[in-house]
Amino acid sequence: MTKGLSSILLLGALVAGCVPAPPTTSHEKTIEASSLGLNGDVTPSIGEQWWTELGDDQLDRLVAQALAGNPSLAAALARVRAAQAQFAAARSNLYPQASLDGNETWQRLSATYIYPPPLGGSYQWMGTIQANLTWSLDYFGKQQAQIERAQSTARAAALDATAARLALAGSVTQAYIAFSRACDLVAVAEQTVRQQEDVLKLTAGRVTAGLETEAAQQQSQALAAFARQDLAQARATRELAVHQIALLIGRGADAYALERPRLTLTALTLPEVLPADLLSRRADIGAAQARIAAATAGRDVARRAFYPDINLLGLVGVAALSGVGPLLAGQAVQYGIGAALHLPIFDAGKLRANLAGATADLDAAVADYNGAVVGAVKQAADALTAIRAVEDQLREQKTALTSARTSFNLARTRYQSGLTPQLNVLSAEDLLIRAQRQSATLDADLLSARVTLIMALGGGFAPPSQVASRTPGPSGRSGSKP
């Protein structure tokens, strides 16, 4: 038996040397970070719960609800569990597999086969109970390559789930900022209605005094109606923003009662240039790298399929004729041990096609990684540009708003005193309305651009080397050591 097993192993090794896999070269190369202009300092530490820096408890609760109940995130976590199960299944192939089989059948035995008459040609019960043991030696590393592929796939799925969590937190925060903007615009619209009604009242008094024409009063009434119309539209936009937040947190109309946001507009410390460690801080980039590793292992699986499978076999059990009773006799015992060899010889090119397909999958994984890398750099650069542009606009907007408010107050006072026509008041009022709306919009735009940059920088994802440095913050929330 030992001699036969040794022969099988030796034969497998010799045949493997005679059946080499064809050479296959990957066409795609990963982009080097040094070629992307990432020459700034490292990214400032971004906490896992970075949105808490905005100082709004209502936002904190909404993000927590989203992370606990969003259907898309639940689906991503389910994919993680499925990938982990596949990894466990692949790893189990390294260990011996045992099974137990049993049967009892009534049948007619052939009179011209292995049983001579009178047993041959009679009807008998045939019973077997047998324990089987198989063990793949993984002599050529096939199972190990499958394990590496499954492990990398599971890691990619886990990083995808992390990226989904970060993206969801960012989406809720952006929706909350849009809600804050809508609330500010409602406040501006309400103030505009009051201003228009005040001008209408003033104009009506001048018409009664004979100092203004009826046309001026009709114009003021029309503008007041337009202001109320704008207010209705602003309130509808605010309600739609609330609906979007409810969708993201996985709730319905029961989540529509939200208070006006109280966001800290100056929160979130961020870099002013593209950081050198941008790529290592993004979970989606890590997932793309893990998929390259999975595709590389998949190509190894396809290449090693050209080599033989060598398995150890073992069995022990009982077999007997004429019912269950004889199975208990000592003479009914049977057992055996051996080895099995499986070698592909001719498959009409199937293995070569599989290897070519696995190489193409590797090229696709590298191309997807390169696309994710270039996209990440663009997202971060766009966010930095947006922040600088909004900051420049805000500096000018402060001057514009102050001047517009002063101009309107002067025009209104002069109109009330009869020193200027109504047209001057309406022009100054229109300028003030535009300035107020622009100020409310720019404040939200700046905060939104900061959140966009946070997401482009990884959104609080900690690279593997930094995971151990995570420590609880003063409030019990998770943070990072600098």
Image: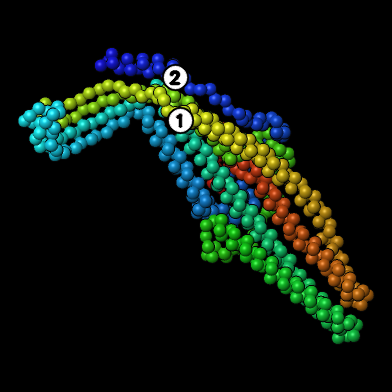
- Is mark 2 in CB contact (under 8 Å) with mark 1? no
Residue that label 2 marks: 19
Quadrant of res 381? top right
- Residue 53 vertical placement versus 22 (above, below): below
Q: Identity of the amino acid at label 1?
A: Lys
- Tell me, yes or no, if residue 268 can be seen here: no
Q: Secondary structure at mark 2?
A: loop
Frontmost residue, 171 versus 367: 367
Query: Which residue is drawn at the image coordinates 37% and 28% (left, top)?
Result: 94
Which x, y percent locates residue 85? Answer: 42, 39
Frontmost residue, 7 versus 86: 7
Tell me the mark number nearer the camera, choosing from 2 and 1: 1
Graded by Cα atoms within 10 Å as few (under 14), some (14 to 19) or many (20 or more), the crowding at tag 1 reads few
- Tell me, yes or no, if residue 169 can be seen here: yes
Residue furthest toward the top?
A: 3
Graded by Cα atoms within 10 Å as few (under 14), some (14 to 19) or many (20 or more), the crowding at tag 2 reads some
Query: Which residue is drawn at the image coordinates 75% and 45% (left, top)?
Result: 385
Q: Secondary structure at mark 1?
A: helix
Horizontal side of 441 relative to 402 (left or right) equals: left
Quadrant of res 189? bottom right
Query: Which residue is drawn at the image coordinates 17% and 33% (left, top)?
Result: 128
- Residue 5 vertical placement versus 87 (above, below): above
Horizontal side of 328 relative to 63 (left or right) equals: left
Query: Which residue is drawn at the image coordinates 32% and 28% (left, top)?
Result: 96
Q: Identity of the amino acid at label 2?
A: Val
Disc on the earlier residue, 2 or 1 = 2
Which x, y percent locates residue 284? Answer: 58, 40
- Residue 350 is tagged as 1
Which x, y percent locates residue 72? Answer: 52, 51
Residue furthest toward the left?
A: 118
Which x, y percent locates residue 273? Answer: 73, 39
Frontmost residue, 203 versus 124: 124
